[in-house]
Amino acid sequence: MSEKFDGLPDVRRRGLEKMEQVYGFEMNDMGGDFFRYTADHLFADIWQRPGLSDRDRRLLLIGMLCTHGAQDVLSIQIPAAYRAGELDEDNLREIVIMACHYAGWPVGARLNSLVEDTISEAKPRGSEATDRKGRSDG
């Protein structure tokens, strides 16, 4: 349990902790009904239901975001899934292929750019060059 959420109602604490886990960055408590529904219902309840893993939920979410062309949210979810180890390079590249065929080539092309940027940004600076399959030159 994160000490920074001490004093918050249990449902809000659980929601904020899950948001941090899913998004991969620090969250702060906020006011308003929209944030209340997001933290208290979506993340404290829906993201923690049994039956699907976080990876399963993430895959479903990425698919839905692709069909809506929600590049802004994909630019949060793809890097977060990669950093969390839920999806590796091969998984992300396969998602691109599926998205091209089910959500349309322009959507898949934008997703491909995001995936390749995510992978290349995660590589240490100065590491050996890799091709689009992640294989080294040497």
Image (spheres, helix red, strand yellow):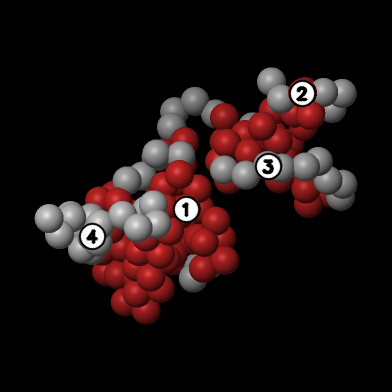
| Mark positioned earlier in the residue sequence (2 or 1) | 2
Can you identify the residue that label 2 sits on? 3
Q: Residue furthest left?
A: 138
Judging depth in this view, the residue of 59 and 27 nearest the camera is: 27
- Within 10 Å of the Cα at label 1, are there few (<14), some (14-19), or many (20+) other Cα atoms? many
Callout 3, which amino acid? Glu
Which of the image's four quarters has the N terminus?
top right
- Within 10 Å of the Cα at label 4, are there few (<14), some (14-19), or many (20+) other Cα atoms? few
Where does residue 127 sit, x and y in percent of width and height? Answer: 31, 54
Q: Are marks 4 and 3 in contact (CB under 8 Å)?
A: no
Q: Residue 8 appears in which quarter of the rendering? A: top right
- Specify the label residue 26 is tagged with: 3
Gap in Å between the C-alphas at discs 1 and 3? 15 Å
Q: Are marks 1 and 3 in contact (CB under 8 Å)?
A: no
Left or right of residue 47: residue 36: right
Can you identify the residue that label 1 sits on? 79
- Specify the label residue 135 is tagged with: none
Where does residue 37 sit, x and y in percent of width and height? Answer: 75, 44
Where does residue 54 sit, x and y in percent of width and height? Answer: 47, 36
| Mark positioned earlier in the residue sequence (2 or 4) | 2
Gap in Å between the C-alphas at discs 1 and 4? 19 Å
| Mark positioned earlier in the residue sequence (2 or 3) | 2
